[in-house]
Image (tube, helix red, strand yellow):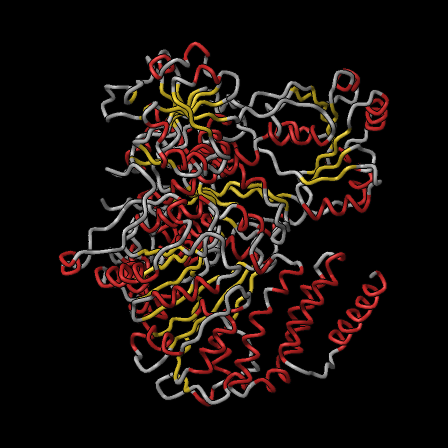
Amino acid sequence: MTPTRLVGPAARQAELDRAREQVGQLMSSADPLAALRVHGSLDTLGVRDSSPFWGGRSGTEALVTELLPAVGALPALESGASRPALPCSIAVLGDPQLAEILQGSADLQAVDPDDWESAVAPADAVLLSPQTVKSPRARGRVIAAAREASIPLIYLDLTLPVPQPPEIRLAARCDVVLAVSDTAAEEYRGGVPASVQVAELVHPISPLRRSPLGSRQQPMRLVSHLESRRAGALDKDARCSLQWIHDGVIASGSQLLIDENVHGRGAWRHRTPVRHRPHLAPSARTLVSELDRLAPVSVVTQEVAGSQTFFSPRTLDLLASSSLVLSTYNQGLNSHYPEVHIANSAEDVAAGLEELHLEELRRAQGDGVRHAFRRHHAVDVLREALRIAGLRVPDAADRVLAVTTEDERADQLLAEELQVQQSGAVELVSWSELPGREGTFDVLLPVSARRRYSPTYVDDHLAALSYQSAPVTGKIDADSAEAADRHAHRDLEGPGLSADRAWPAAAPDGPLTDISLSAWLHPDAARLASPEALCAGAGRIHLQDHLGHHLREPGLTEIHVRSHETTAAEDSAGGPAEDTVRRAPSALTHGEDLEAVRREIVRTAAREELDLSVIVPVYNNGEHLRHKAFASLRRSTVFDQMHILLIDDGSTDPVTLDTVEELTTAHRNVSSFHHARGGSGSASRPRNTGLELAQTPYLTYLDPDNEAIEDGYARLHEEITAHPDVDFVLGNMSQWARRHTRLPYAGILAETFAAQIEEDGSLAVPDRALETLSFRPLGIQTVVARTDWLKGLGISQPPGAVGQDSYFFQQMLHYAHRIRTLDVGVHTYYMAVSNSTINTLNPSYFKKYLPLDSARARWLDDVGLLKAYRRDRLERFLVSWHLPKLKKVRPEEWYEAAENLAELLACYGEHVWTDPAALEFWDDLEEARKSSAKRR
C-alpha cells in the first residue's frame, strides 16, 4: 500500500523551473502585461490552490468560515478520569491567568482585594506569581494573614526567563519559590533568604484548556499560526526562522492561516510581511482552542533560544491538541521534544510537508500528546508544587496491573514487553489471580500474546485516562492511520466490549478495538472475575489511535533472534524473504554476528540497487533518531537510493531498541546492527562498524540528533557520481546553539586552496594540506565519500573518544588526492542537546578527549605534522575550545577536570605556552595542586 502523504508528492522544483522560463518569456515580450494575461501564466508563476485568491476565494477569512461546521462538531473538553482535582483549596493572588492555566487541578479561588479573607481563610496554600507584583492591593495583608495561619506561600513563576528585582523581592517574602526557567531559579536562589526553598517545575497543561478530543475530523491540508506575543520578543534568528516557516508552508501547497497578535510599544514594526498578509485571518482569534484541535500542523515561535527548561507554553497547547508543531529554535524543545520540527530553511519546511506521510504525522502527533500529558498535566504539576511546600496530597492513580489468560501468563515475549514499558515495569497476572489483587492497582490492562506492545503502549493509555473522563480507553485495531483516523480521539457508546474479540461486533467497517487493547481505571471488584464480567456493561470507551501495538507475527511464541542465514536457493534468488519480525530487547543483549549482518547488508544493497550508505550511530536516542535524523533523510530526493545503516552501540533504552527495529522492518532500504548492550562511550565504535559494513559505492554519516538539510546529500551524491576521479565531495554545515550560524566549509577549502583548483573545478589536495589549513576541524557529516577509497585508507575513529569526527576528517583530507566542494547546506548540528556526550560538562568530558588526542598525536608524529600542530593549533584550541568548557564545570570538580585536561595536552609533548589565558590556566592548576597536596 502506498503511504498517504499529507500534501502530495513534491513537484516544487519543476514548478520553479517552469516559472523561471515563463518569467524570461514575459520579460522579453513586447507587451508583458498582455502576455501575463495569457491563460496559464499566473498558474505557472505559482498561484496555487493554497493561495487565498485561488478559485475565487476572497481571503483566508473564507477559510475560517469553511471550518465553522467542524468547530461546532468538536466535543467539549473534559477533566481527566485519572486526574480529578486535588482535594485542596488554593487561593490565587493577583493572577487570573495562572488560575486559568491550572483550571481543574484543585479548588482555585481568586483573591478579591476587597474580600480577601473569604479566599485566604479556608486555603491550604496561597499562590503568587510575577503578575502579583502588579497587584499591590491587599497583598501585604494576605501575606501577613497566611503567615499567621501557617498557610504556605508559594511563588510560582511560569512566565519569566529571567526575573527582575521586583519579582525577586516578592519571591523573598514566600515560603517556596518555583520557576520553569533554570536561569530564573538561579536568580531567585541568589536573591531570596536561605530559608526559602527554590526549585524548578515544568509548565502545566490542563485538559480543560487543551486536549486532542475530536482532533482527527478535519482532513484539510491546514497549517495554522495563531499566536499572541509582545513586540520585540523575537530575536533576529527567530524572526528569520518564522519567515522560513511561512514561506515553506506556502511553497508546500498547504493552506496557511495566520493570526499574529503582536502587542505593545512598537508593534507596528513587527507586522506580518506583505507577502504573507493574504493568509491573515483576524477572526480566528476567537477560535484558537478549537483551531488548535483542527489544524494537523501548527506554528509557534520561541522568545528564548538558549534554555533547556524554558520555552513558549503555546508549544504545550499545540502538542496537547494533537498538532504537529513547526517552531523556531529552542534548546529545550530540541532536547526533550524531538517531535517538534525546528525550521532550518524554507526549503526544508516545504520538503518536510510535501514528503510527510500520514503515518509519520500521526506518530509525531501521538508522541506530542503523550509527552504533554505525562510530563505536564496541571494536576501533577500542582501536586508537586504542594508537596515541595510540605503539604500532603494524594498520589496519582497510575499503578498498572496487566492480566491475561492462564495459558498466556507464561508467554516470555509478552512478559518482557510489559517489563520494559516506559512508564515502568508492569506485573502480569492471570484472570484467576486477579480477584485477589483488588486494591493493589489503579489501572487494569488486559493483554494478549496475539499482540506485540511497544514500550510506550502503557504510557499512551495513562495519558488518555488523564485528558478525558471515560474510565475505559482503547487502542484502535488497525494497521494504518487511513483505517483508524475516522475513529481516533472519539468515544464509543454501546452495549459493551466483547471479551473474545471486538466491540461493536457488527461494526460496518470491521472491529474497532478489543479487550487486549483496552485499559480500565478502577474497575468494580465484582467485574474482576473474568473477561466477560469485566466487559459487561462497559459503557463509554474512549478510542485513542492505532499506534503502539500490532498483531504478533505468526508462529512467534518466544524471544526472536533474527536469522541472517540463507539457503543456496535463497542466495540464487537474491536472498531470503524480508524478515519483518521486530525483536525484543533481550534478543539483542549480546549483540549480533558481524559477518552474518554483513551478508544481509550485501543482499539488501544489491536487491534494492542502493547507491549511498548513510551511517547513523545510535545510543539511547530513539526519539531523536525517528523525528530528527530519519525524518530529515525521508525528505531527500535520493532517499530511495540510500542504504541507511542504523548502528546501535548497545542501547539500554527499550524505546530506542524498538525504534531501530521498527524502522528496519518498515523500510526495505534500512539495515541495522546491534552491539552488545552497554555502550562504548561515544559514536566512534558504531561509526567504525558502519564503515566496515557499508556496501554501496558512496557513503556519508549523520548523527541521530542532527538533521540533513536542503537536500544536500542528493547534491553531493550527484556531484561525486559525475566526477569519478575525486575521493570525496564536501558541503556546508549549519549549527544551532543560542544562535544560528552557517559554517561555510566548502568556501573555506576553496579559498584556502584556490591555487590548487583545477579547470574542471576539482581541487588537487597538496602535500601538508592540514598545515596550510592550520588544522582547522571540519565535519564528516558534510561529506559524501567513495566507500572503497575510504575503506582502503585503513583509518578508524578512536573508540570512546569525543571530537573524533574532526580528527577523522583531518585524516581523510591528508590522504585525499582530489576532492570537490559544493556551496550547499548538508546538515544541521544541534550543539546543545541535553545529556549528549559532548554537551555534559564534568571531569569525564575532558577524559573522553584523551583517546582522541592520544591517537591524533601519534598519527601527526607518524606523518610528520606534530610540530606544525603544536605551533599552529594546540594553543589556539585550548584557549578557544577547552578553557571555555572548563569554566562551566562545577567549582568542586574543577581540579579533577583540569588535571584531565592537562593529561590530554601532554599527549603532544613539550610546548612553550604564550597565550595569557593558557598561562593563567597552568598557574591556576599549579595552585590547585598545592592546595590538594596540603589537604592530603
Residue 349 seen by the camera: yes
Identify the residue at image location x=52%, y=23%: 82
Eyeballing the image, is 352 above or below 801?
A: above
**Which percent across, then down, holds residue 161?**
68, 46
| Of residues 636 and 674, the one drawn nearer to the viewer in this rendering | 674
Eyeballing the image, is 926 above or below 485?
A: below
User: Quadrant where the C terminus lies?
Assistant: bottom right
| Of residues 40 and 566, the one drawn nearer to the viewer in this rendering | 566
Quarter of the figure with residue 188: top right
Eyeballing the image, is 435 above or below 411?
A: above
**Which percent across, then down, holds residue 718?**
31, 71
Say left or right for 705 vs 850. Answer: left
| Of residues 36 and 469, the one drawn nearer to the viewer in this rendering | 469
Quarter of the figure with residue 379: top right
Identify the residue at image location x=38%, y=71%: 784
**Which percent across, then down, holds residue 853?**
58, 73
Eyeballing the image, is 534 above or below 135?
A: above
Say left or right for 152 vs 436. Answer: right
